[in-house]
Amino acid sequence: MQQRNDAPSLGWRINKLLQLDAMNLVILVIAVYIIWSVISALIDNPARYLPSPIAVAVSSVDMLYKGLLPSYFGDTLVRLIFGSTIGLLLGIPFGLLLGINRTVADMFHPIMNFFQSVSGIAIFPIIVVWWGNSDKTIFAVILYTAFFPIAFNVLSGVREIPIRYISAARTLGASRYQIIKDVLFPGAMPHIATGSRLSIGFAWRAVIAGEMLAGRQGLGWMIFTGQDADNTAEVILGMVMIGVTWIILDHYLLRPMEADTIERWGLVQR
Amino acid sequence: MSDAIAKESSAEGAFASLSVAIQTRIGRQRLRKIILGSIPFVVIFVLWQMNTAFEWLPAVFIPPLGDVFGAAITLQEDCVGIGGALTMDNSCLLTNHIFSSIGRVILAAVIGLPLGIAFGILAGMNRTVSRYLEPVGVFANSISGIAWIPLAIVWFGVGWMTTLFIMLNTIFWLMFFNSMLGVRSVAKVYEQSVLTMGGSRMDVIRQVYFPGAMPSIITGMRISLGFGWRALIAAEMIGGDSGLGFMIFVSAEEFKIEEVFLGVIIISLIYMATDRYLLAPLEKWTVERWGLIWKPT
């Protein structure tokens, strides 16, 4: 068994990433900036097709000044956090239940498989008919998309726990509840982490799509109405915001959390 | 478990012998799985039928099951035989939408997959290339296909090009990453041994990188087509003029809920069928055939 080193601090990690990629990123950003500017200078009607980076920056200042950007951003983030948290809170116990009881698992596995292949975006029109273009609709779609990845991951996590751990706990007189709490839950921890990241990723896509389709204020709505109003600078600004937010969320929050969880709870034994 | 056995052994007559025959034919465990797995479907089906009968929820929200299948026939009403469907005659509404969605997937796969694989292998071989392409890819993946839709509409207008662009965007980057990681996972020893035996750079690509990355590439294909299919449905809803996504979106706006249900069922059936009967077996076969289970130490 490998010796576990103390997990590096967040500051150290960011520092190392900066050292490693900073130079490349600077070059890359400058290159993209130049190419983007040249294309936008060469085409006709750049305001419509590809506004220059400066125009996008100006529009961001404008939107910040009006207070729209923070409010849209906040709306989207709140939806994501709210929806994915409840999705995870429902999915994890359900996955555990499926993992514990083979009969329940055999019963629900096929139908979960079916619903997982019905993507959240595809059931969107149905929910719109039910609840109209409301926050409830977006919320339902987020919940739906976040639920299945985590449930499946927890299920496979529980299944992968060596049976001898459960037997050992039982031999020592552990109750059913203790086995769940002390063996199954910690044992499934790495899968829970991976599943959470997947679920939140899917939920993020669902939020953006939901806002576009349901027309509720947020980043998705911002890029959608920007296109309607011929305000391409706003569209590009929204896209950049969406991309940057997800990179920050994924690379600096979820992935390190996943890695730490796997390191702490992983059952890697040779 | 034990009382299930007791129950079955106490069953008598023709039914018992039939059940034994079925059990030996299919296998006890599989039969158990099939029966248990079908329970939720049966429950939903019964609830649905009861809803139709008692109207707990109005038919505007949950259409009768018959209407859902009826919608397929209504949509295909004026269609003249299989020939009309295949030539995408204007009167064949349903098959036209299905074919245009599938056509886009095939077109995007034919263009996007080879491109993604080629760039991925290049980036896997060459650190400098990957150093510059990788951040772009990370960013492109983070924007996710859906967020490109408004800009794509500005550039290409509503229709074929927009949906194709969204799909290509999704497929290309996922494929790129998977091929790149696949090439990187190939042990250096294989490359060196080919070079030692006098192989050219082309030989290394053909004999080492490509087969070595094959399992990862096929997995990438499966993932990217799955994501691509989802992105396509979204793209058709917002920026399409045909296809299944367009169909369900327009039907929802016209409150033809039975067409929406039909569309959703067809969308998931197409995805399930492709994934289970084409991509998953392909993946399994590839891993068995090309997977590098033996690893030099």
Image (spheres, coloured by chain):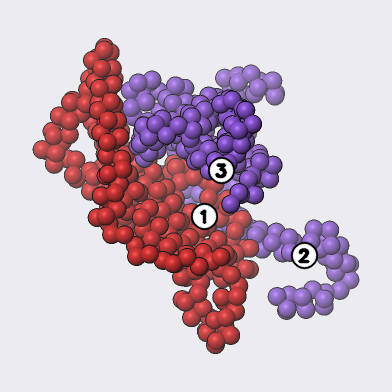
Chain colours: A red, B purple
Chain that bears disc 2? B
Residue B81, how many percent across, how many down?
70, 23
Q: Give the answer, above or below, for where B1 lies relative to A222.
A: below
Tell if the residue under mark 3 belongs to the same chain as the one under mark 1.
yes
Residue position marked by numbered label 3 in the rendering:
B187
Chain that bears disc 3? B
Identify residue type, mark 2. Answer: Arg
Chain that bears disc 1? B
Near-viewer residue (B63 or A14):
A14
Residue position marked by numbered label 2 in the rendering:
B28
Secondary structure at badge 3 equals: loop
Secondary structure at badge 1 equals: loop
Residue A44, how many percent across, how many down?
26, 12
Q: Give the mark nearer the N terminus: 3 vs 2.
A: 2
Residue A5, how many percent across, how many down?
38, 64
Please name the residue shown 54% across and 40% down the image.
B188
Residue position marked by numbered label 1 in the rendering:
B55
Q: Give the mark nearer the N terminus: 1 vs 2.
A: 2
Identify residue type, mark 3. Answer: Ala
Near-viewer residue (B51 or B215):
B215
Residue B129 shows up from this direction = yes
Of marks 1 and 2, the one in the foreground: 2
Q: CA distance from mark 1 to mark 2?
A: 40 Å
Neighbor class of circle 1 (other Cα within 10 Å; few <14, some 14-19, many 20+) is: few
The quarter of the image holding the C terminus of chain A is: bottom right
Q: CA distance from mark 3 to mark 2?
A: 44 Å
Identify residue type, mark 1. Answer: Glu
